[in-house]
Image (spheres, grey):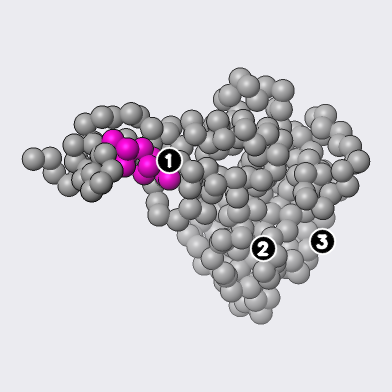
Amino acid sequence: MPSLAEVQASLAEALLGSGRSDVAAMVAGDGVAPEARVDIYRHHVLASLTTALRSTYPVVCRLVGDGFFGYVAHHFITARPPTGPCLFEYGEALADFLERLPACGDLPYVGDVARLEWALNHALHAEDAVPFDLDALRSLDPAHVDGLTLRFAPSVTLLSSPWPIDTIWSANQVDADPEATVDASRRPVQLQISRRGDDVVFRRLAPAAYTFRRILLEGGGLSRAASEAARVDAAFDVIAALHELFTEDVLTSPPDTSGPGEPV
């Protein structure tokens, strides 16, 4: 007699399209042949997950075509099945999957468009956070300013691409001008994606500002972030960059005031 875990593993493998026949012996027919019942379940699982992926990646779906997206989704689902119960958490690895498909070679930007759509999905469902309180800086020891680290809201993602993925995304919205054309040649962009109130937004960042924020987002100290940004652009103004950060509602309280080298 197989264990519950073995039954669950066999059923999961069958539902993901592996074609296992032995699982039918564990399914009650109840008026429908067990093999047919497994096929019904399999179809429902694949259809539900494909619908979830289409919902998360509408622009990717439009770029590759609905039929091809269905083909991609089927193979992605069988190769990378969900590991959690929430459908909006499923599909982060699709960008890498698309980039490995030879059939997508004519759309070299499609992987990064997928990453943008995933970042928008992440921002929409990210946990709320307490906005940064500037008064918290009043207690900061000036000796610790260089090592200061700042916490970004959970909705924030920074994304760099060699392609104008924001323009490509905007041109493929339902309300976009159907006569508009997009220059999809290599033109690097650096983007910040976040949630503002109930709205998910993204904006372009200058290369130095992107470097500054990326290092801070990764937990680097203020001194290092400013130094790296200045290497990108000698005219980088750290005071202006901080002012912009503090007024954008992308930071969450409290900052790390424990001193250089200490964890947040």
**SS class, disc 2:** strand
The CA distance from mark 1 to mark 3 is: 55 Å
Magenta highlight range: 35-45
Sequence order check, earlier mark of 2 and 1: 1
Q: Is residue 41 magenta?
A: yes
Q: What residue is drawn where x is 67% and y is 22%?
A: 105
| Three-letter amino acid code of the residue under disc 2 | Arg
| Three-letter amino acid code of the residue under disc 1 | His
Q: Which residue is mark 1?
A: 43
Q: Which mark is residue 240?
A: 3
The x and y percentages for residue 262 are 48, 60
The x and y percentages for residue 21 are 26, 29
Q: What residue is drawn where x is 56% and y is 61%?
A: 125
Q: Which residue is mark 2?
A: 195
Q: Mark 2 against mark 1, which lies toward the viewer?
A: 1
In the drawing, does residue 37 fall left or right of residue 212?
Answer: left
